[in-house]
Image: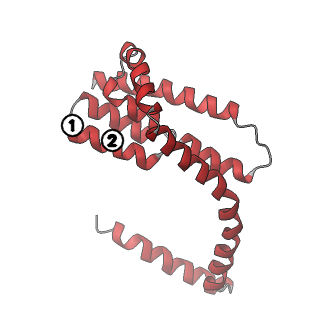
Amino acid sequence: MKIFSVIIPLILIFIVIYSAIKKIKPYDAFAEGAGSAIPLVFSIFPYLATILMMTELFEKSGLSAKLVELMTPVTNFLGIPSEITPLILLKPFSGSGSLAVLSEIYSSYGADGYIPRCASVIFGSSETIFYVSAVYFAKVKEKRLIKPIIISLVSTFISTIFACAVCRVM
């Protein structure tokens, strides 16, 4: 474990030595790179603000709870515990929100067992699809979002079914 505590300082030393050999001013290069990130932040911000507001509205409106209630028979049929349905619904929208749901699952069911194991695998192996889409599509000119998002959601759901099946065997 001690080796990991020296990796970052070694990388920084390597960068300084490399930049001295190449006659590059590392601070100026860093400042220039950071300055070019500002327009990117401004171009992404509206998309991220929309995703965050929609996630909060989804939760506060009660639509999330209603959708969990409607999906429970389907998820039970597919071998997915109904207790993790809120995690499945929230993970494509919000990483921090789904982390809160995961923490609730741990506090309710412990850290070892079928339900927490499924929740852990699903949390760790899925992505915040709408956040990533907002960041990616903010920078590209092509704005046809529906196909990649549908493909991502379907593949996430299939991997969720597979994850629960594997956790059941373990």
Q: Residue at x 51, y 38 (%)?
A: 92
Residue indicated by mark 2: 102
| Tally of marks | 2
Give the side of residue 41 with respect to residue 61, left or right.
Answer: right
Identify which amino acid the numbered label 2 is placed on.
Answer: Leu
Picture layout, residue 83 above or below residue 45: above
Disc assigned to residue 108:
1
Q: How is the image coloured?
A: secondary structure
Q: Residue at x 55, y 43 (%)?
A: 54
Give the side of residue 39 with respect to residue 8, left or right.
Answer: right
Position of residue 21 measured from the top left corner of the image (x, y, whole percent): 64, 85
Can residue 111 be seen here?
no
- How crowded pointer 1 is (Cα within 10 Å; few <14, some 14-19, many 20+) is rated as few
Q: Residue at x 40, y 30 (%)?
A: 65
- How crowded pointer 2 is (Cα within 10 Å; few <14, some 14-19, many 20+) is rated as many
Position of residue 117 measured from the top left corner of the image (x, y, whole percent): 29, 33
Position of residue 67 measured from the top left corner of the image (x, y, whole percent): 45, 26
Identify which amino acid the numbered label 1 is placed on.
Answer: Ser
Is residue 94 or residue 13 the one in the foreground?
Answer: 94
Picture layout, residue 15 above or below residue 60: below
Circle 1 — which element? helix
Q: Quadrant of the N terminus?
A: bottom left
Disc assigned to residue 132:
none
Q: Residue at x 35, y 30 (%)?
A: 84
Position of residue 144 measured from the top left corner of the image (x, y, whole percent): 75, 37
Is residue 126 or residue 170 the one in the foreground?
Answer: 126
